Amino acid sequence: MSNRLRIALTKGRLQDQSVALFERSGMDCTPIKHPGRRLVHSIPNYPLDAVLSKAPDVITYVEHGTCDLGIVGKDTIMEKGGSFYEVMDLGFGRCRFALAVPKGADFYGTYKTRVIASKYPNVAKAFFVAKGMDVDIIKIEGSVELAPILGLADGIVDIVETGATLKANGLVPIETVAPISARLIVNTASMKLYKNEILDFISRCEKELKEAQEG
């Protein structure tokens, strides 16, 4: 293959898990594992360059074609949206969006308009629109668990892994909004221009994920 693909990786845990997947498929990811201050790294034994970025930027780079592929959480896809192909559930980075309320609260047992705090207002809005419920949504950038404690909100929509943070702040999850995991996304034009290269990359990932499941 002569064409080098460019993939945007979400920094942090998803980056580490992505690199582990690439290494199992035979790619030398030494440059990514020891990045220094560099943000773009070439895999020496496979025509792929990796761009390390924040989750929302992964979608921006893929959507605008500066990166052909991206690995990003379903949470970011749901909140930000965009025009690209979501081609694969990579299976790692699993957690969920949940609606959580103060312990003992009767969230659905009132006719007043509920106030919901969330870092993901679009996700929260879509969830309650689907239920036919009218809620006020407040965007919170920091620790969203504070909103019910301070009396700002009746509940929160947030990412839940173990639920320990909710419990420590007197909150309980009462409904799952959506499951979350890492997804492989592809620029729409790149899928046509570099179809064979992209399909080769996808097949390598699929093979490794299948072997991991069977193992």
Image: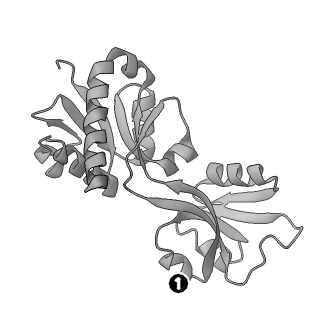
Q: Quadrant of the N terminus?
A: top left
- Within 10 Å of disc 1 (Cα), the crowding (few <14, some 14-19, many 20+) is few
Residue sticking out furthest to the top: 193
Visible in this render: residue 36? no
User: Picture quarter containing residue 155?
Assistant: bottom right
Question: Foreground residue, 46 or 212?
Answer: 212
Q: In which quarter of the image is the C terminus?
A: bottom left
Q: x, y percentage for residue 7?
A: 30, 35
Residue beneath the point at 35% across and 32% down: 69
Which residue is painted at 29% across and 53% down in the image?
214
Q: Where is residue 200 in the image (x, y as percent from the top left)?
A: 26, 28
Asked if residue 113 is positioned above or below residue 45 in the image, the reply reads below
In the picture, residue 124 is in which quadrant?
Answer: bottom right
Q: Assign a secondary structure to mark 1.
A: helix
Q: Is residue 200 above or below residue 27?
A: above
Frontmost residue, 19 versus 142: 19
Drawn side of residue 188 relative to residue 80, left or right: left
Residue at position x 53%, y 69% in the image: 143
Is residue 133 found left or right of 21 in the rendered image? right
The residue that label 1 is drawn on is: 168
Eyeballing the image, is 100 above or below 15?
below
Extreme-front residue of the structure: 214
Q: Is residue 64 above or below residue 54?
A: above
